[in-house]
Amino acid sequence: MSGPIPVMERMDAAPRGAAETPGLRASRLVARVWVGAGFAALIAVVAAVAAWPIYRSGTFALLAVAGTLVGGGIAALGWWRRWNGWAVAGALALAILILGVPLAVPSPLGAPDDLVRGLGELASGLVLGWKDLVTVELPVGSYRNLLVPALVVFLVGTCTVLLLAWREDRAAYAAVPVALGMVTFGLFFGRTTVSAPLAIGPVFLYAPVETAVGLAGLVACLGWLAWGTHDERVRALQRAAASSGVRISRRPS
């Protein structure tokens, strides 16, 4: 039987007990941060495209951008300062209060009564906005408090995806279901019909927009999983080399 012959990497002796160098660990952390940030940004774009038919308004576009940026900022600060879950949750709750009234519940802020009314609409939207999206006619624009669920998706979702993606243990893979949940919001909430079939010669592609959005989210998640698996394998090899006292060389024998 003929076939490709595997090439073994040469292993050079290294001092026993050698650990991962600070420079190598720093480079791996930088790579994980950038890859995780790119993954979260791509998912946010796909989720915004998926949810656009529900709102179809400039207010929604502004909310999606602001929610993604603020959620990413909270994740970066929490990761850098090593916040626990309660601190991150508190920061997200504060961000919802600050961004909710001007973005998710557009209303005048001149009088105290307007602010109190807006906060009441915000609280109602957090609980009932999800159900109302299923019953109202699309697109909803910035009607009442129906933008509140979108604020939660892009603010909390982006922050959660980043904090999970930046972890170095198996919990990092939990970023995938959260990312798929962000995309699913636009695909299923409030939709009663799908896009018109697309004819490509004799072939008819049903729900082409929804199919493209779903595939884009799935490909992004698969790419992240592939990179995470590769990174975990590299770290496992480095740990094994450090504990066994040998250094794995990249040069083929």
Image (cartoon, helix red, strand yellow):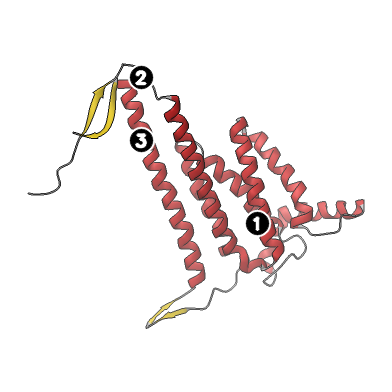
At label 2, the amino acid type is Ala
Q: Residue at the location (54% across, 59% down)?
A: 46
Picture quadrant of residue 117: bottom right
Q: Residue furthest left?
A: 1
Q: Report the Cα–Cα distance between label 1 and label 2.
A: 47 Å
Q: Is residue 214 above or below residue 9?
A: below
Provide residue 7's location: percent of width, then percent of height: 18, 39
Mark seen at residue 18:
2
Quadrant of image for the C terminus: top left
Q: Is residue 251 above or below residue 107?
A: above
Provide residue 151's location: percent of width, then percent of height: 68, 54
Q: Work out whether mark 3 precedes mark 1 in sequence or the reverse, and give the earlier one.
A: 1
Does residue 189 show up? no
> Which is more toward the observer, 148 or 72?
72
Kind of element beneath mark 3: helix
Q: Report the Cα–Cα distance between label 3 and label 2.
A: 16 Å
Q: Residue at the location (35% across, 17% down)?
A: 17
Label 3 Cα crowd, 10 Å radius (few <14 / some 14-19 / many 20+): few
Q: Is residue 3 above or below residue 215?
A: above
Q: Which residue is mark 1?
A: 64
At label 1, the amino acid type is Ala
Q: Residue at the location (57% across, 55% down)?
A: 44
State if disc 2 and disc 3 touch (CB < 8 Å).
no
Mark seen at residue 234:
3
State if disc 1 and disc 3 touch (CB < 8 Å).
no
State if disc 2 and disc 1 touch (CB < 8 Å).
no
Picture quadrant of residue 129: bottom right
